[in-house]
Amino acid sequence: MELNGVSHQSVLAILDRDTNVFFGLDKSTLYRLDMAQLTAADGTPRGWGSMGNPPFMSTINYTQPVLALAQNHIHFLNIGQPSQADIFVIHFAYFQPEVQSYPGANGASGFPSTHGQTASIFKGYDAVQAKFAFWPDDKSSTYVIDVQVRICKYTRAITLLTTLE
């Protein structure tokens, strides 16, 4: 099933809880699905609106996208360079023109450019998330990226998420 060109089988989506808008990447196009006005399910399909092609899509073959959410920004990982992310600023609907680097803390290596999973790390309902975790599909390490101080910490154990504070 496709709605406005977006396939529910292939879209990779992330929810911005501040705006209650889903952002999805499908077939090299970024889409948005605004749920802010919906207060209860009503059975009506909602259409995705195209936001165009992310600028970095023209320079890389982005076949295995990885999206992370922190600081009201969508971080596109697995862009071909380790410890780097392309960034979409949600509240201004704007792609940052330069790539953001997240070097490893204390000279350690940062996260690899590979497919994996992410999770936002929240510090309460009213606080914006400043960190996200990333772990490659091979589960070799867990990386915690702090977007405020722009560093990446990692551990070989998946248990790092319980010891963040």
Image: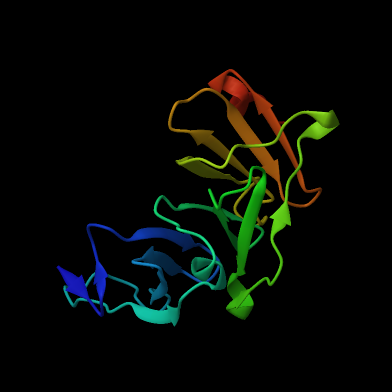
* Outermost residue to the top: 157
Above or below 19: residue 149: above
Query: What is the quadrant of the N terminus in the image?
Result: bottom left
- Quadrant position of residue 86: bottom right
Picture coordinates of residue 157, whole percent (x, y): 58, 18
- In this picture the colour scheme is rainbow
Please name whichever residue, 164 or 156, is drawn nearer the observer in this view of the structure: 156
Question: From what the image shows, is residue 160 above or below residue 37?
Answer: above
Total count of labels? 0
Q: Position of residue 121 (x, y in %)?
A: 60, 43
**Image-quadrant location for residue 123:** top right
- As drawn, the residue found furthest toward the right would be 106
Q: Is residue 47 left or right of residue 1?
A: right
Query: Which residue does the image show at 46% across and 69% down from the upper left?
Result: 20
> Where does residue 23 sit, x and y in percent of width and height?
44, 67
Residue 6: x %, y % from top left = 27, 71
Task: Classify the position of the C terminus by image quarter.
Answer: top right
Please tell me which residue is depicted at 50% across the width and 40% down the height of the picture. Answer: 114
Q: Residue at x 57, y 49 (%)?
A: 80
Image quadrant assignment for residue 155: top right
What residue sits 45% from the left and 57% below the top? Answer: 62
Q: Answer with left or right where residue 113 lies relative to residue 32.
A: right
Foreground residue among 85 and 16: 85
